[in-house]
Image (cartoon, grey):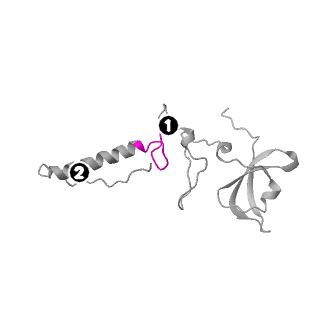
């Protein structure tokens, strides 16, 4: 069942002099639409259900995030910390292979130092060097941040 259309009118419900017959037709249409809305729960194109924690169950969430327009998708977790492995599942690329990989400002790649095997995160800013190679800024994942 698809989400119902919002074609409810209230033209004959806002004045004591309105026609009772026309008011009944508008109330009936509103109740039918409300019933359709309730029945659209957990159906394609309907309302998402909520679990006992008032959250949408994971099986009702998409596995892929896609922007429907020209705007980027923004993730804003309550902690301001995003676990990159939970968002992007990337295969490690050698840092040497990244030099030929196009990047735009904000591009992120999961990388390694090749034979050394140390993992890193590379960030592209859309810059190239004098030879035309793309510049990636690499951060080793073994570096720890501590408050002490």
Residue 57, given in percent of the width and then of the height, sits at 53, 38
- Whole-number angstrom distance, CA of label 2 to CA of label 1: 36 Å
By secondary structure, the bulk of the magenta-drawn segment is best described as: loop
Residue 140, given in percent of the width and then of the height, sits at 76, 45
Residue 126, given in percent of the width and then of the height, sits at 68, 62
Q: Residues within 10 Å of mark 2 (few under 14, many from 20)?
A: few
Contact between labelled residues 1 and 2, with CB atoms less than 8 Å apart: no
**Which segment is the magenta one?**
39-49
- Residue 133 horizontal side relative to residue 115, left or right: left
Out of 148 and 81, give the one closest to the viewer: 81
Compared to residue 70, the image places residue 85 above or below, namely above
The residue beneath circle 2 is 25
**Which image quadrant for residue 134?**
bottom right
Assess whether residue 43 is covered by the magenta stretch.
yes
The mark found on residue 55 in the picture is: 1
Out of 110 and 57, give the one closest to the viewer: 57
Q: Would you say residue 13 is visible in this rendering?
A: no
Q: Residue at x 42, y 50 (%)?
A: 3
- Residue 104 horizontal side relative to residue 119, left or right: left
Element on which disc 1 rests: loop
């Amino acid at each position: 069942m698809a989400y119902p259309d919002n074609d409810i009118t209230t033209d004959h419900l806002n004045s004591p002099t309105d026609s009772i017959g026309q008011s009944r037709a508008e109330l009936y249409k509103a109740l039918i639409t409300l019933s359709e809305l309730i029945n659209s729960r957990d159906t394609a194109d309907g309302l998402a259900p909520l679990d006992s924690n008032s959250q949408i169950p994971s099986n009702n969430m998409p596995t892929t995030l896609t922007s429907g327009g020209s705007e980027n998708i923004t993730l804003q977790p309550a902690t301001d910390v995003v676990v990159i492995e939970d968002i992007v599942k990337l295969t490690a690329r050698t840092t040497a292979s990244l030099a030929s990989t196009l990047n735009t400002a904000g591009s992120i790649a999961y990388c390694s130092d090749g034979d050394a095997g140390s993992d890193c995160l590379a960030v592209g800013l859309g810059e190239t060097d004098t030879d035309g190679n793309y510049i990636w800024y690499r951060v080793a994942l073994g570096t720890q941040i501590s408050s002490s």
